Image: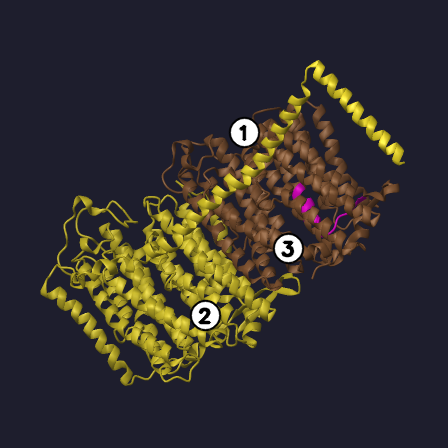
Chain colours: A yellow, B brown
Amino acid sequence: MIAEVLTPLLPGVPLLLGLVGLILKPGDGGPRKAAAFLGIAGAALALLIAIVLVVVVDAPVQVGMEWVRFGDLTVSLSFSLGPAALYVALAVCVVALCVQIYSVGYLHDDPRYAPYAAQVALFTGAMLLVVSANDLVLLLVGWEVMGACSYLLIGHDRRLPEAPAAAVKAFVVTRVGDVGFLLGIVWLAVDARTFRIDGLLADPGVHTAAMLLILAGVAGKSAQFPLHTWLPDAMAGPTPISALIHAATMVAAGVFVVFRLFPLFAASQVTLAVLGVMASVTLLLGALAATAQDDLKRVLAWSTVSQLGYMTGALAVGSPAAALFHLLTHAAFKALLFLAAGAIIHAVGTNFMSRMGGLRTHMPVTFVAFVVGLGALAGVPPLAGFWTKENVLVAAAHATEGGGPAPAWVGWMVWVAGLLGVAITAWYATRLLLRTFFGHVRSRTEEWFVGFDDARYEVPPGPAHDPPGVMRWPLIVLAVPAVLLGFAAFLPGFRSALELESPHLGVSIVAPLLLLVVGAGSSWWLWHTAPGVDPAQALGRLRPLFAAGFHLDQVQDLLVVRPVRALAGAVRLLDEKVVDAAVEGTGTTTTRLGDVLAGAHRAALPRAAVAVLGGALLLGVLAAIVGVAG
Amino acid sequence: MIGQVLLVAVLALPAAGALVTALLPERTARITATVFAALTLIVAASSWSSQDVSWLWVPRLGINFHLGVDGISYPLVVLTALLTVLCCAYTVWKVPEGGSGRTLSALILVLEVGILGTFLALDLVLFFVFFEVVLLPMYAVIAGWGGPNRRAAARKFVLYTLAGSVLLLLGVFTVVAAAGTSDMSLLAHGGGLSRTTQCVAFTLFALAFAVKAPLWPLHTWLPAAHTEAPTVGSVLLAGVMLKMGTYGLIRIGIGVTPEGAYWASWVLGAFAVAAIVAGSLICLRQTELKRLIAYSSVGHMGFVLLGIATQTTAGVQAALIGNVAHGIITGLLFFLAGAIKDRAHTGDLADLGGLRETAPRLAGLVGFACIASLGLPGLAGFWGEAFAVFAALERGWTTFAVVAAIGGALTALYFMRLLRKLTHGPATPALTGIPAITRTEWLAWSPLIVLTLAVGLVPALVLTPALDSLALIGALR
C-alpha cells in the first residue's frame, strides 16, 4: 500500500518543488535560501522515498490510472518500479542531492541561482519519471523535460559566449534523435495497440523498424555516435550540471530505456547489431578523443562518451545486467570526478591542464577524490569500475561464442573495442592525473582566464586549496560508492535485483589487467622521460584530429546544418517570390484591369453616343432573333 | 429551458455589450466591455450540455436559427470567451495607438459574437453568416490600431478571406440545394447526399477553410495581418479565428460531406505535411518577432489539419486538442511578443537580445511559451502534434508521419534560434532599462500560463467531452 502511494511521489516531489522554485524571483538578488531549501529538499525527499521503497518493496510495484483516450487506445498515467529500476532511482537521488548541496557553494556568487536550483530539481524529477514510468507516453514526458532542462542549464552561464550555442546544440541534436524516438513509440503502439510497457513486454513481438527508430532517440540522449556531438560542447554548463548530466540523468536515460525495453530489442538481431556497431564506434571514438584534450572537463566528457559505449556494448551483446551495473558505478565515479574537477576549477580559475600542475600537496582531498575516480574509471582493482567493466568484457566474450540474442560478430567487435578501450582509458586517466596534480605549479600569465572558465572566480593569490565543506562533503560521500560499489556483486539481493551473474575471477581478467598496465605505464613513462611535457605530444600528427573529435562537428555542419539552412532560405524565397507574389499579382492585375475598363468608359461624347447606339442596335437585333425563334 | 436561455445569452451578452460600450465614455466603456466579456465567459462555461435552440428562420428554404453546443465546440467556445476577457482587460490598461479604446473594445465584443456564433451554429447558412460577421471588425481592428503598414495588411486580409468565403457560400448552397435543408443535425453522416455532390461540396469547403486555417500555400494573408495587427488583434486572430477554419473542416467537412472528405483526405494530408515543413523552414529564416510567431502558426495548424485529414477518431481528437493548445500558447506568445515590442519599440530580432539580463521574468515566460509551443511533452502543445503523427501512422501514411515528425524537430530548431537571439547574450540597447511586467499583464497572461500546464497535464479536460460528440457526428473511420 505504502509503495503504491510513494511510487508516483518519487518523481512527483522533485518536479513539484522544481515548479515552485521557478516561481521564485529570478535574476539579481533572488532569494537564495528559499531556492536552496527547495532544491535540496526535493532531492532529499526523493532520496528518502527511494530508500523507503528499497526497504519496503520486494515485488515490483505497479500503480496507474487512465490518463486520456485517443480513439480506442488508452494512454495511462501508470508507474512501475522493479528492483533494478529502484537502484537506478537511488543512484539518481544520491547524485542529485550531492549536486544540489555542492552547487550552493559552487554558485555562491551567481545571481541567477534560484532558477538554476529549480531547474536541477525538475531535471532530477524528469529522470525519476523516466525510471518509474510504465507507459511510453509518460516516459516520453520525462525524456523530453530532461532535454529542456539540459538546454536551460547548459546555457546558464551568462559570461560564456559559447554557452547559448552549446545549449541549443544539446537540445537540437537530442531532439533530432527524438524524432525517431517519438515515431518508434507511436509505431509500437499502432502495432501492439498499447502504450503500456508491461503490456508490450508481455508479448514482445518483432518490431525491427520501431526499435531502430527508438535507438535513434537513445543515441541522441546517451551520446552515441553519430549523435554524440552535443556532449563535449555541453561542458559550457556549470560543472555540477556536467556531473548531473553525465552521471545519473540524461545520458543514463537512453541506456536505461534500452534496459527497460530489452526483450523488445532482443527479439530482433538487426537492432542489436546496429546497437553493437554504434557502441563499438562510440567507445573507441570517445576514448581516442579524450587522449588529446587540454581542457580538464573535456577529457571527462569524452570519457563519458566512451564509457557509454561500454554500456550500450553490454546491451548489444545481450547482457542488460552488466550494462546497468556499469551505469550505476559510472554514476558514482563520474559524478565524483566532475565535482572534484569543479573543486580544481574553483581553486585555480581555469579548465586547462596546461595551466595546472603540482596541485597534489595543496588539495589533498581533491587529489584523493581524483585518484579514486580515475582509478575506478580506468578499472583498477578493486575499485568499482574494475568489476563492472570486467562484467561487460565477460559478457562480450560470451557472446563471441554465438547462441545469444546477438550475432557472434557483434560479440567479437564489442569485446575487441572494449579491450582496446581499457588501455586507452588507462592512458588518458594517467595523463590527466599527472598533468594536474604532479610536476610544478605553473605560474599565472595574462591569458590565464580563457576558455571554458565557467567558474571565473576572483581566485585569491597564493596556492590553491581544497574547497569549503559544502563542496568537500559531496566528494567524500561519492568516493564511498566509487570504491565499494563493485563489491555489491557479491550481495545476493543486489545480484537478483539486477539479474546479475555471480562474479568469478578467472583467466578473463588477465588481458584487461595487462592492457591497463600497458596503458597507464606508457603514459607514465612518457611523462617520466620528459617531465613537464604533455604525453599527448607522442600522438604526433594524430593529436589535432583526436582533439577535434575526428572533425565530426564539421561533418555534421556540412551534411546537416548547411543543407537545412540553405533549404530554409530557398523555401522562404519560394514563399515570398512565388506564393505571395501570385497573390499580390492577382491583386495588381485586378486593379489594372479595372483601370483599363475605367479608361474605356471615360469616352468623349461622340464616341460614347456611338457606343450607346451600337449597343441598342445589338440588343434590338438579339431581341428580334429571340422573338422570331420563340 | 434554462440551457437554451444560456445558449442565446452567450451571443446576446457580447452583442449587447458592444452596443452599450459604444455609447459610454472612454474609460468606463472599456471597463464595461470587460465586465460583459467576463459575464459571457461565465455563461459560456456553464452552457455545457445545454439543449439546442432551434427557431424557424426562413422556413421556405429550410433554414433554421439552430444553435447548440457539444464536446467539439465547447472547448473552443470557452477559449474564445476567455481570450476575449483577457483582451478586453488588457485594453483597459493599454490602448494601442490609432483610435479610441472604446471603439476597440466594442469591436472586440462584435468579433466575439461572430466567433462564438460560428462555433455554436448548427445550420449551414447561419454558420456562414457568423463566419462573415467576423471579417469586418477584424479589418477595422487591424486598419485602425495596427502598425505602420496596417492598411495594406488589412486590405489583404479582408480580400483574401472574402475570396475564401465565396467558396464557402458556393459549398453551402451546393449542399442546401441538393439536400433541401441546411440543418446540420439532419445533414450529419452525409445526409443522403450523393457521392459526387459530396466531393464537389467538400472541395469548396476545404478550399474555403484552408484559407482561414490557414493551410500552406493559402496562408500569405496571415504574416502581414499578424505583424501589423495590435497585440489584442493578433491574440484573437491566432488564438481563435484560425480555429474557425479547422472547426469548420471537422464540423462541416467531415460531418456533412464525409464521403468527399475521405475522397480528398490524401491530398489534404499531403498539403498539411507540406505546411508543417514549409512553415518551420520559413520560420528559420525570419527576422521579425511577430512575423516568426505568425509563421509558426502555419506549421502548427499543419499538424491540426493532418489530424483532420486522417479522419480517424484519434486524428480528429488530436486536431481538437491541437486547436485548443495552439489557441492558448500562441495567444500567450503574441501577448509576450506585443509586450516586448511595446517596450523595445522594435520587433527586429537583430536589435533584440539579452532579455534575461534586463527582464528575467519576461525572458522566463518567453522561454516557457516557446518550449510549450515546440511541443514539449507535459505541456499543452504536445498532444496534438504527437497524436497527429500517431493518427497518420495508424492510417498507413508512413511517409507523412515521418515528415511531420521531422517538421516537429524543425519547430524546435527555430524556437531555439529565437530564444538564443532574444534572451541570451549581452543586452542590446533596445532592451536596456525596460520596465518590469505590470500587474495587468500578469492578470492577462496568468490564465494562459496555467492553462498551458493544465491542458498538458490533464488533456482529458479537452478530450473527454469530445469523444462522445465525435461518435455522434460519426463518419470517422
Find disc 1 in the rendering and name its residue.
Answer: B147
Q: Position of residue A309 (x, y in %)?
A: 35, 69
Front label number (3 vs 2): 3
Q: Please say whether residue B131 is visible from this viewpoint.
A: yes
Mark 3 → mark 2, Cα distance in angstroms: 34 Å
Question: Chain under label 3?
Answer: B
Mark 2 → mark 1, Cα distance in angstroms: 53 Å
* Mark 3 element type: helix
Q: Position of residue B354 (x, y in %)?
A: 40, 39
Front label number (1 vs 3): 3
> In the displayed image of the protein, which residue is found farthest to the top?
A605
Q: Does residue B261 appear left or right of residue B379 in this picture? A: right
Reply yes or no: does residue B73 show up in magenta: yes
Q: Position of residue B325 (x, y in %)?
A: 59, 49
Mark 1 → mark 3, Cα distance in angstroms: 36 Å
Reply yes or no: does residue A537 show up in magenta: no
What's the amino acid at mark 1? Gly
Q: Please say whether residue B182 is visible from this viewpoint.
A: no
* Mark 1 element type: loop
Find disc 3 in the rendering and name its residue.
Answer: B309
Q: Which residues are magenta?
A: B66-80
When asked about the image quadrant of residue B24, the answer is top right
What's the amino acid at mark 2? Val
Give the camera-side residue of B192 and A106. Answer: B192
- Please tell me whether residue B327 is drawn above or below residue B109 in the rendered image: below
The reply to whether the C-beta atoms of the residues labelled 2 and 1 are less than 8 Å apart is no
Find disc 2 in the rendering and name its residue.
Answer: A258
